[in-house]
Image (tube, grey):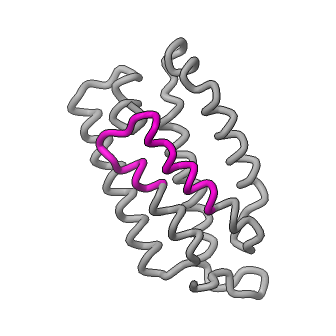
Amino acid sequence: MANTFGAARLLGAGAPLAYALQAAASLAAAGVVVIVCRHRLSLPTRAATLAVATLVAAPLVLLYDLMLGTIAAAWLVRDGASPAALPWQKLALAGLFLLLLGGRGLAGNWHVPVFPLAAIALFAIAGARAWREMSPIYCGKRISSRS
């Protein structure tokens, strides 16, 4: 499974701990979505955050569900010229893409939960973008386009 529960189980955690970690991830994802929507940030940031938070919060995520992550990444890349976009974000998104190409081998052979970690990393990238947009002034201009 490509969610927090699956990652915890792959790393050897018991079922109760894995359920607790999944619940915490779901609550954190829901909280970030509420904050992003209430602050009325730009549409690309809201859409990317909602899409990737769905991946993090869902109790069952399989490999084909990672397409939601592609949608989130596309929103972030689309708005790459935004002042809220950090220089390293495009490189991080490209690295995640390359990591996911060989993710099944890493997960199967080395027991590394690549897919859940990729979803969490994408969630962190979207959260960093939202955090920067919430700051009222960045380089003398308003970051959020409020669309």
Does residue 67 show up magenta in the picture?
Answer: yes
In the depicted structure, whether residue 20 falls above or below residue 77 = above
Q: Which residue is drawn at 31% across and 39% down?
A: 60
**Considering the image in quadrants, where does the C terminus appear?**
bottom right
Q: Which residue is drawn at 54% across and 78% down?
A: 41
Q: Residue at x 34, y 25 (%)?
A: 9
- For this view, does 85 lie left or right of residue 38? right
- For this view, does 63 lie left or right of residue 79? left
In the depicted structure, whether residue 134 falls above or below residue 65 = below
**Which residue occupies the foreground of this view, 102 or 14?**
102
Residue 33 image position (x, y, % from top left): 41, 66
**Considering the image in quadrants, where does the N terminus appear?**
top left
**Which residue occupies the foreground of this view, 106 or 28?**
106
Q: Residue at x 29, y 33 (%)?
A: 18
Residue 36 image position (x, y, % from top left): 47, 72
Residue 78 image position (x, y, % from top left): 69, 64
Q: Which residue lies furthest to the left in this view?
A: 16
Residue 29 image position (x, y, % from top left): 39, 57
Residue extent of the magenta highlight: 52-75
Does residue 62 show up magenta in the picture?
Answer: yes
**Which residue occupies the foreground of this view, 130 or 65?**
65
In the depicted structure, whether residue 50 falls above or below residue 144 = above
Question: How many numbered badges does the structure rendering display?
Answer: 0
Q: Main SS of the magenta segment?
A: helix
Instruction: Give the quadrant of residue 98.
Output: top right
